[in-house]
Amino acid sequence: MTVSQRKKKQSSSVKARRKDSGLRRFTRNILLAVNILLVVLLVLAYLSIYINPATVAFPALFGLAYPYIAAANLVMVIVWILFRRWYALISALALAAGFGYIHNFIRFTNQGREEHHDLKLMSYNIRLFNFYESGETNTHSKMLQLLRKEDPGILCIQEYFVKGDPAVGERKLKEGLGGRRYTHFKLIRSGTASRYGIATVSRYPIIHRGDVVHPGSSSLTIYSDIVVDTDTFRVYNNHLQSFRLRRVEGTLLSELAGEENRNSMDNIYGIYRSLMQGFASRALQVDRVRRHMESSPYPVIVAGDFNDTPVSYTYRVMRRGLSDAFVEAGYGAGFTYRGKYPPNRIDYVLYSEGIECTDFDIVKVKYSDHYPVIAYFRRAEQKEVLTGQHSRRKQ
């Protein structure tokens, strides 16, 4: 090889290294920009819980997307570690700052134990028994079999549906659950011969029934004063404002798939408007429920479909001063919604002092677009008694 050939080869090698270095630098800068954007979105999600969506709704979008924004930041941490870059600290520190938020979605330790309980409460959005869902058969009987098998002391149902005489539907529900029950229904007319609403069914006596009215909305909240042995609890059963996206979403997905090419921007705006209205409506509703709860003469248990995530104004206001059964006794991922939108946690059981949650289950049955959730409770003084007995056994 001549000298000139060696020089040409070296020159080509230098140019290739420079090109490769420039490409790596460009890729790194793009990734860094994406990383910074993801951290900004994560911070906005953190802040969204303090901003009332009835005043400014836009930040609530980031709270709704929090699990996926957090997951994207975790991916960035892994990417930077593989590149051996200190940039991994950017997302790592942002995630660490909101570690408490992660715990509201995922529990890494199993503290729940169904060793003893005084009360078993189930909350379940049954999606109208799938009455209007094509391809669904025998869902009504399957749900009743599940409810009878679980046999909760208190059952909170959302999206209850009855066609025909409501009294007949109530009787069939009681029979399906296996016998005598105390009930509290709040139904609104849906069509000429059907009704839709919310129901609390109890094995224990209900001594008072009432509701929290949400003007101009089909959202429902009822409260039932229930005597469990010698204790009285006020149980709130909620179905807060949904986004009402199903029709718009279906049209938009068809367009994005190429089936339609018109009005896509109108549909995107329709989704955005539905989201904003949903955030704002729930904010007003949760404020209304919260004010009512503060006047309760009894310890409260708050259950139902909040239609919002743990990173939301709705959850923060509703949980204030209360414990979250999943956080206290659950394990694994807490996602309760399994419908057309990305999975999320929107069904809850919250409770005040005086009782302890000993276990929490999410029953993974696919009869509805929600999973039922179950919380097991015992009296706080019962915990002390059991702890004392356990200590004496050790001596």
Image (cartoon, rainbow, N blue to C red):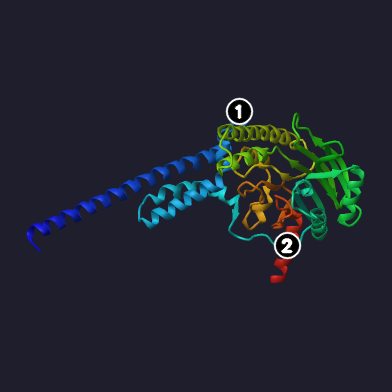
In the drawing, what numbered circle is on residue 55?
A: 1
In this rendered view, identify the residue nearer to me: 254 or 364: 254
- Establish if 373 lies above or below 184: below
Write the residue at 64% across / 60% down: 111
Write the residue at 51% across / 46% down: 69
Write the residue at 83% across / 43% down: 225
Q: Nearer the viewer, mark 2 or mark 1?
A: 1
Q: Amino acid at mark 2?
A: Glu
- Look at the image and tell me in which quarter the C terminus lies: bottom right
Q: Is residue 148 visible?
A: yes
Q: Amino acid at mark 1?
A: Thr
Q: Give the labeled residue for mark 2.
A: 114
Q: Is residue 317 visible?
A: no
Q: What is the x, y in percent for residue 347? A: 69, 47
In the drawing, does residue 102 fall left or right of residue 164? left
Q: In what element is the residue under mark 2?
A: loop
Q: In what element is the residue under mark 1?
A: loop
In this rendered view, identify the residue nearer to me: 275 or 92: 275
In the drawing, does residue 81 fall left or right of residue 161? left
In this rendered view, identify the residue nearer to me: 17 or 386: 17
